[in-house]
Image (tube, rainbow, N blue to C red):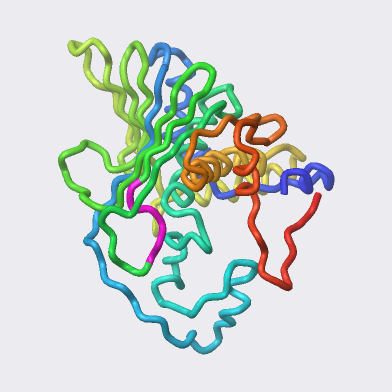
Amino acid sequence: MVNAARSANRVVQVGTHRRVSPHNISAMEFLRSGKAGRVGMVRAFVHSGGAAGVKSPDSEAPAGLDWDFWCGPAPLRPYNKAIHPRGFRQFMDYANGTIGDWGIHWFDQILWWTEEKYPKKIYSTAARRVKQDSSDAPDTQVATFEFESFTCVWEHRLYAANNAESASLGVYFYGTEGTLHLGWRDGWTFHPADRKRPAIHENPTLHDPDTQNIKELWADFLGAIKAGRRPACDIETGHRSTSMSLLANASVKAGQSLVWDGDKETITNAPRANALLSRIYRAPWKYPQS
């Protein structure tokens, strides 16, 4: 998609809308100003609650839904209301679990902050520890991404959400002058290393009905078309953020750490793992060739 957008000279924007959210923009300005000091580690996370769940039986697809077409190039399996609508995110045939659903948004913030375009080494472990519902994506996952100048850690769990931790999602930037938590509905907060100094906080500016900033995203998209510029959430930035999620899942499937050549987009230490960067398409669909 990146190659197609560039060769056709078109504006293509993805939905990583936090790049246009006011508190996210100001958080980036704060970090880049050096007020957090030198950041050596970032931690992105999602901790959402919920019980173990129960399995949902397969059934006939609802009237008006072409289930074969909905499955597309993915495997054709019986319709289940746990998959559609919305639940597809937790089924690995159709999505990439929580690290694919939520991870790209927070990886995007990290790549927005750093001048580095991709990690050098990736390792991830994942499992289903608690969930007993019909889904099959990991309910527990931890991944590490080694960059040249910092270490990135991802973690998620789909259980045990509580008030024991100050935040349930977001990114912590750990710097020599303090720690900045960049969140969603809670804005951002900087905790100075000097405990005598007060914390700095900025509330978010979000729009109903979904407490997002889709309004600003559309405005930027239309502005980019009129001005002939790249949008805030350009297809290449979305590609790089998505790649981090996919590489973590590839590490899980390969059962080893991966060395990534981001320029050539190749895993250099595990040739078999490169096959995991694409998928087998169900006929009559065909994987697009560049």
> Residue 107: x percent and y percent?
49, 37
The residue under the point 51% across, 51% down is 214
Q: Is residue 164 left or right of residue 243?
A: left
Q: For the magenta stretch, what is the residue range?
A: 135-140
Q: Is residue 211 left or right of residue 72?
A: left
> Would you place residue 213 above or below residue 260 in this image?
below
Residue closest to the far left: 164
> Residue 266: x percent and y percent?
67, 36
Query: Which of the 4 image quadrants contains residue 243?
Result: top right
Query: Which of the 4 image quadrants contains residue 148?
Result: top right
The residue under the point 24% across, 58% down is 50
> Would you place residue 162 above or below residue 153 in this image?
below
Between 71 and 174, the one nearer to me in the picture: 71
Magenta-drawn stretch, dominant element (helix, strand or loop): loop
The residue under the point 55% across, 28% down is 119
Q: Is residue 20 visible?
A: no
